[in-house]
C-alpha cells in the first residue's frame, strides 16, 4: 500500500532551498523571506510550494513551485496550497513567473485556473521570456471553494 500524500509545514528554509535548487532562474539566490510547504508521500518529497514577495499593502503574493512527480497533484492538495495566501494571508491575488520554455508549468498553471497576464521579453536572458500568471481571490473561490460543496 502506498502512503497517502501529506503536507509538511515549519521547514520553510529547507523547503525553499529545495525548490530554489530545482528552478534554474532562482538558484542559489533563493527567495528571500518566505514560507514554504513540502508535499510528501511517506518520507519521499514529491514537490513543494514557496510563498514569497508577500505585499500586504497590495494584497499580493508570488508563488513558486517545483515537483519531481505528478503524484502530488490531487484536487484537495491544490486547493489547500492555494488557500494559504488567499485564506491565511488575506491576499486578493497570487501570481507566478514562469520561463517561457517551461511548457509543463505553463500548462499546469492554466489547468488550475491561473490567467496569463503578460509576458516579459528576454526576462530570463536572450530569447527567454517570462510568462506572468495570476489568480484573483474571487477566481479561487469560484473554482476551488465550490469543490468543497460538491
Image (cartoon, helix red, strand yellow):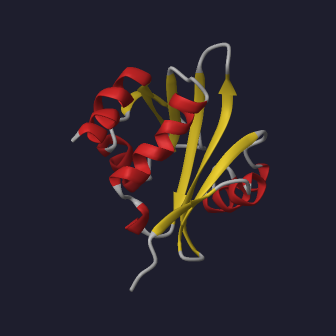
Quarter of the image containing the N terminus? bottom left
- Measured as percent of width and height from the top left, residue 112 is found at 34, 43
Instruction: Tell me how many marks there are.
Output: 0
Query: Can residue 130 be seen?
Result: no
Nearest the camera: 36 or 126? Answer: 36
Residue drawn at (58%, 23%), measured in percent from left and top?
Answer: 60
- Measured as percent of width and height from the top left, residue 18 is found at 68, 62
Outermost residue to the bottom = 1
Left or right of residue 33, residue 45 in this image: left
Query: Can residue 36 be seen?
Result: yes
Q: Quadrant of residue 79?
A: top left
Outermost residue to the front = 149
Residue drawn at (42%, 23%), measured in percent from left and top?
Answer: 136
Quarter of the image containing the C terminus? top left
On screen, residue 54 above or below 73? above
- Measured as percent of width and height from the top left, residue 104 is found at 38, 56
Q: Quadrant of residue 116?
A: top left
Amino acid at each position: 500500500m502506498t502512503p497517502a500524500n501529506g503536507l509538511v509545514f515549519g521547514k520553510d528554509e529547507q523547503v525553499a532551498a529545495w525548490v530554489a535548487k530545482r528552478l534554474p532562474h532562482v538558484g542559489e539566490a533563493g527567495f528571500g523571506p518566505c514560507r514554504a510547504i513540502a508535499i510528501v508521500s511517506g518520507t519521499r518529497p514529491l514537490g513543494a510550494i514557496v510563498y514569497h514577495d508577500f505585499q500586504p499593502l497590495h494584497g499580493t503574493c508570488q508563488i513558486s513551485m517545483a515537483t519531481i512527480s505528478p503524484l502530488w497533484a490531487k484536487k484537495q492538495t491544490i486547493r489547500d496550497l492555494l488557500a494559504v495566501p488567499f485564506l491565511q494571508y488575506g491576499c486578493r491575488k497570487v501570481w507566478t513567473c514562469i520561463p517561457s520554455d517551461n511548457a509543463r508549468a505553463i500548462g499546469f498553471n492554466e489547468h488550475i485556473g491561473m490567467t496569463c497576464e503578460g509576458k516579459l521579453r528576454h526576462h530570463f536572458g536572450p530569447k527567454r521570456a517570462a510568462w506572468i500568471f495570476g489568480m484573483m481571490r474571487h477566481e479561487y473561490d469560484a473554482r476551488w471553494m465550490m469543490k468543497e460543496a460538491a
